[in-house]
Amino acid sequence: MDQDDAPAQAERISQARTAQSQALLEDYTELIDDLMRAEGEARITDIARQMGVTHPTAAKAVARLKREGLAVSRPYRGVFLTDAGTEMAERVRLRHRVVVDLLVAVGVPADAAEIDAEGIEHHVSQATLEAFEAFLDRRGS
């Protein structure tokens, strides 16, 4: 690698770390929203089980959601999303659906598209997502 490329590489790595951190928040808000819809609240125990993590790991993630203004918790109750958290969950759900629909449109089997979309949905830019939607709209016409 050339010395001149080092700052650009450092920036790409930093952006990837930020995206990965954001993806985790998005996964948790989406899951909490799902649990709230199904159960009326999301308990840390249920969050940990569904995410496949330990109780302390889920509690740490929820603490971060609370710091970010995406969730609140109540004594002797579960975790609840704020309006901002609910909006994030909806954005993630929509992005996921667009990515799945695109993958299926280009021939990816539905099961594989669902799995692959879990990773792609967090890293696709708004410009790319809009291009996916435009492609799908053209195909539907």
Image (cartoon, rainbow, N blue to C red):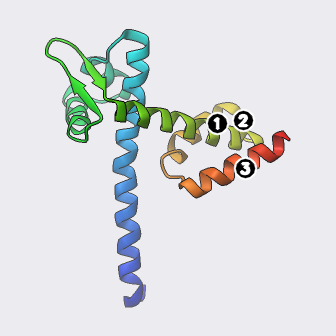
Q: CA distance from mark 1 to mark 2?
A: 5 Å
Residue at left 58%, top 41%? 116
- Foreground tag (2 vs 3): 3
Disc 2 secondary structure class:
loop
Q: Earlier in the sequence, mark 2 or mark 3?
A: 2
> Of the residues shown, which amino acid type is indicated by label 3?
Ala
Outermost residue toward the bottom?
3
Q: Which label belongs to residue 109?
A: 2
Residue at left 77%, top 44%? 137
Q: Is residue 74 left or right of residue 50?
A: left
Q: Is residue 55 left or right of residue 26?
A: left
Q: CA distance from mark 1 to mark 3?
A: 22 Å
Q: Which label belongs to residue 134?
A: 3
Residues at marks 1 and 2 touching, judged by CB atoms closer than 8 Å: yes
Outermost residue toward the left?
75
> Of the residues shown, which amino acid type is indicated by label 1?
Ala
